[in-house]
Structures are given as structure tokens and as C-alpha cells.
Image: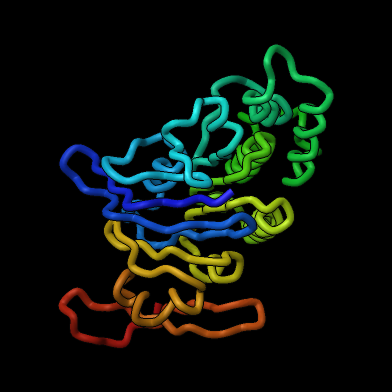
Amino acid sequence: MKLQIQDVCFRYESSSVLENISFSVKPGRLLALVGPNGTGKSTLIKCIDRILKPLTGTVLIDGNDVHRMGPRALAQTFGYVPQSAASVFESSVFETVLLGRKPYVAWKEGAEDREVVWQAIDALGLNALAWRSVHKLSGGERQKVFIARALAQQPQILLLDEPTNNLDLKHQLEVLFLLKRLAWKDQLVVIMAIHDLTMAARFADELLLMKEGRVHGAGTAAEVLTRENIADVYEVEARIESMPEGLVVVPVERRPENGSRRSETL
């Protein structure tokens, strides 16, 4: 299932947020959206998932416009994990993840639905918390619950807005390895917004570097994460080091606002 974004523009009232965004992602690929805060990464994900409607442009799945899909088909195609999700009810982890089966359940969940839920819970290492109230979990544990809920939808396209928010290093790695494995093993399209450039370089097949609502660079980590691009987009001087695990981005000097250069170790 190929995802294509064609000339997407979006505005909040008179403020332009996205300008002529175009790219495509094939099944089995993990795409990382990177760029400074406020550059439109979250808005782009919401436009893809039809939470927001682009001012112009189209979002296509195998050539079909997502805005012509019914709500049920859309929910069976897309799994979406926002930056922070709130649990309205005093529900357990199992009950919260079970909500991911809603697009498939007519009246009451069956044995197959419960099996899918347990698989998602197990994939995120949440078995010991299955019957605990989501309200009593830490921020990082709740984040993993909502990722599990999206997996329970069995989507073909998985959209995640800062999926490693509130996670310590160990759990960041667990989640990113899982997303990489899901993309490859289940041939999903996985798109995530992420701030950590080194993690993006290590786990993503492709990167989309955004600046002020536009695509500043697209391609592999080696093509996108150059010293010039990082200086242009982040206004930070950086050293790019090649390691066996992938590229490492090391900030080395802050660019003064007046444009003159001065040595300042971060």
C-alpha cells in the first residue's frame, strides 16, 4: 500500500503552516519527519490521517484519495499515535488497547480481537500492567499503551507524533526497534515525527527535513543530515560522524544571532 502526498498546503486562519509538501512512502519503509519545533511536522501527520483537511493538495493511498474513504475504512488503514493522548475513562491497559479493535467490532469483541490485543500488549512489554488503570501509569508507560492501541487496529499505515516522548533511553530503543521491525516484517508504512537526529538516522530508512513548513531535504540520512542542512535549518554547527550503527550528529557550536562566528561548546 503506497502512500503519496501531493502538493499539500495547510493554513491556520491567515498563517501558513505547510507549503507544497510532496513525497511518497512504500510499504516496508520507515520515514522520519525531522525539523525544529513549529515547522509543521504534527500538522502534516494530521493532514495525512484526515484529522485536518489540507487547503490544497491530496493524500493518496494506492492512487485513491483518503478524503473519499469512509470512517471505518480509514480507521482500518491508519493507526495514529499523538504526542500525548488522554484516557477519558478509568480504564485498564487491556480495555484501552481493546479500543483499537473498534473498527472491526460490530457489537462485541471476540476471541480473535482479544488475541490481537494481547499481541499488541506483549509487543510493548505491558503484560504486567494489563489490568492496571491507565491513569496510574507513568507518562512513558501511557505512551506505550497508546502505541499498543494503534497496533491493535492492525493498520497498514502507522503515524506517530514523537513516539519516544517521555521514554527513557532503554524504552526509546525498544519502541524504535519495534517500529523498524513492524515496517519490515509486516510491510507497513511507518511515519514518525522525531527530534533526535541520531535516532532518526539509525532507525529511519528515509528522512524528510522540514523548515518553516517546507521540505528542505529528503532522502537517506547521509543525504539529508549534512552540516550545511543542519546549519540552515537548526542554526547550529554540527559534526557528522559515521558509526557502525549509523550517523551520529554532534552539535559543536552555536550560531550567534548577529551571524559572526564564535566558539561555544554546547
The residue located at (49%, 77%) in the rendering is: 249
- In this rendering, would 9 be left or right of 24? left
Toward the top, the furthest residue is 107
The residue located at (64%, 43%) in the rendering is: 144
Q: Which one is in front, 166 or 97?
A: 97
Toward the front, the furthest residue is 63
Question: As displayed, is residue 1 above or below residue 119?
Answer: below
Residue 20's spot in the image, x, y percent? 29, 55
The residue located at (41%, 51%) in the rendering is: 5
Image quadrant where residue 214 sits: bottom left
Question: As displayed, is residue 73 above or below residue 48?
Answer: above
- In this rendering, would 238 be left or right of 79? left
Residue 8's spot in the image, x, y percent? 32, 49
The residue located at (59%, 48%) in the rendering is: 1
Residue 59's spot in the image, x, y percent? 42, 44
Residue 206's spot in the image, x, y percent? 52, 66
Can residue 215 be seen by looking at this rendering? yes
Question: As displayed, is residue 186 above or below residue 46?
Answer: below
Please identify the quadrant where the C terminus is shown.
bottom left
Can residue 133 be seen by looking at this rendering? no
Q: Which one is in front, 71 or 166?
A: 71
